Image (spheres, rainbow, N blue to C red):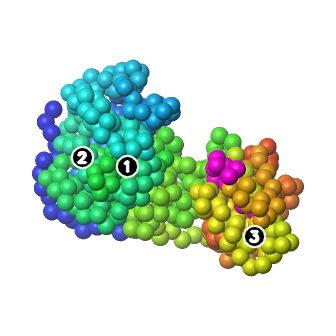
Amino acid sequence: MPERGNHKTANPPHRNDLDSPETVNLTDPRTLVCKFGGTSLADASRIARAAGIVARMAGPPEAGRVPVVVVSAMAGVTRELLALLSEGGAAPPALPRTLLARHREAARALGAEEEIEALLDALPDRFAAAPSEAALRDAVAATGEDLSALLMTAALRAEGIAAHALDARAVIRTDGAFGRAIPDDETTVALVAERMAPLIGEGTAPVLQGFIGADAHGRTTTLGRGGSDFTAAIVGAALGAREVTIFTDVDGIFSADPGEVPGARILPELGYEEAVELAWFGARVVHPAAAKHAAARKVALRIRNTFHPDGAGTLIRPDRRETPGVAALAHRTGSVLVRVRSRPLFMAHGFLGRVFGILARHGIAVDLVATSHTSTAFTLERPEGFEAARAELEAVAEVEVIEGLATVSAVGRGLLTQPGAAAELFRLLAETPVHLVSQASDTSLSFLVEEGSAGALVRRLHEGLLEHPRQEAAS
């Protein structure tokens, strides 16, 4: 099949309209950026489907749209790879047979056998070169994305698109914090301009791995869970995109978990702050860092379903403005509440500084916080490792730990500044014991409740606030 897109075209002016789903077909050929998650790439047929979606988005060669595609690992692959390092941290002698068979089968179907075998042959030397256990972990974790990029490149070529697997390590520059690397935005923008833009200019579609980058020494780093969304946002912003499409296995962002709330509906639009809060508090459709980065660079993110690609999905806009009120609800189980009360001998100023200084020294991440002059209460994102910090806290304070809790969050606009915006929310909470209330912004209001009551509370709030709001509350 002849390759398509090997041509240059003048750059037409940007459109600033974000209201139509058709704006995903961006008018500047540099800026057609899309990302596919692991379930969208689970086997050869799904990769071929994703490539077909990209081809339809790009349109005919004369349209002058050259796609940039970011890929995750096949579903479940990263978890399987990291399991190889669960004991001892030594380099794995070989990849699991099931993983090898899965990728080789896909390679045969898509015509990428030579590229896949070359990568597999190079892995032992790559793993052996890792200078530390943390560096090795990232090198191993990145393998799934490395394989997916080669498979997607072959699938795009089968669609007639001139595609090139561009190693993300060549353009995504990060610090050296293995496992949770932070991108160097200025350097990355320069590398995208130097190494990616010329490919696009000549009509070649770059395909790069999500989730991974490289530090200044060229060592593989990873961006943390959900990092492929982050990669897509970084690349889209660096290329001046007005919109980046994130393809996943859901139709968009819902007003609540549709598996638990029958009346949940797709939100056609969200502001980035709402999307970040929803992602953080349990609705993990988009990575919070991706939404933050995209908003800072004035790039919209559209969430779409690979398996229903004609749906409009949810548009996350950096400039969204809407009427005050709750837009969506999220909840997250497994929350741990820590209450710290000052002992009488330590009533002097600096109590809170002492408490949070201890947490910082032990690397304890805190989620929700409520404080008074002599006490503080907070929830832990991850309770692992807290016992050592607890022992130090108990030298100066009374410490109580309560487990089996859940965080329920209402997300919207005007929840802090608009009079009465949260009144109905509190009315609906009347029958539910609440351990902690936290509100630090105009966008979210969170409650800590017993884990067993969280689901019923979310359903009650959704029905009362979003499905059948009281007339006086709506007015």
Q: Mark 2 — residue?
A: 166
Q: Residue 208 in magenta?
A: no
Q: Residue 379 in magenta?
A: yes
Q: Earlier in the sequence, mark 2 or mark 1?
A: 2
Q: Mark 3 — residue?
A: 371
Residue 281 vs residue 342, the one in the foreground: 342
| Residue 370, image quadrant | bottom right
Q: Is residue 50 left or right of residue 390?
A: left
Q: Earlier in the sequence, mark 3 or mark 1?
A: 1
Q: Nearer the viewer, mark 3 or mark 2?
A: 3
Neighbours of disc 3 within 10 Å: few (<14), some (14-19), many (20+) = some
Q: Horizontal and vertical percent for residue 437?
A: 76, 63
- Distance between mark 3 and mark 1 Cα atoms: 37 Å
> Is disc 1 placed on a helix, strand or loop?
strand
Question: How many numbered marks have been drawn onto this rendered protein structure?
Answer: 3
> Is disc 3 placed on a helix, strand or loop?
strand
Q: Is residue 91 left or right of residue 208?
A: right
* Span of residues in magenta: 377-388
Q: Nearer the viewer, mark 2 or mark 1?
A: 1
Neighbours of disc 2 within 10 Å: few (<14), some (14-19), many (20+) = some
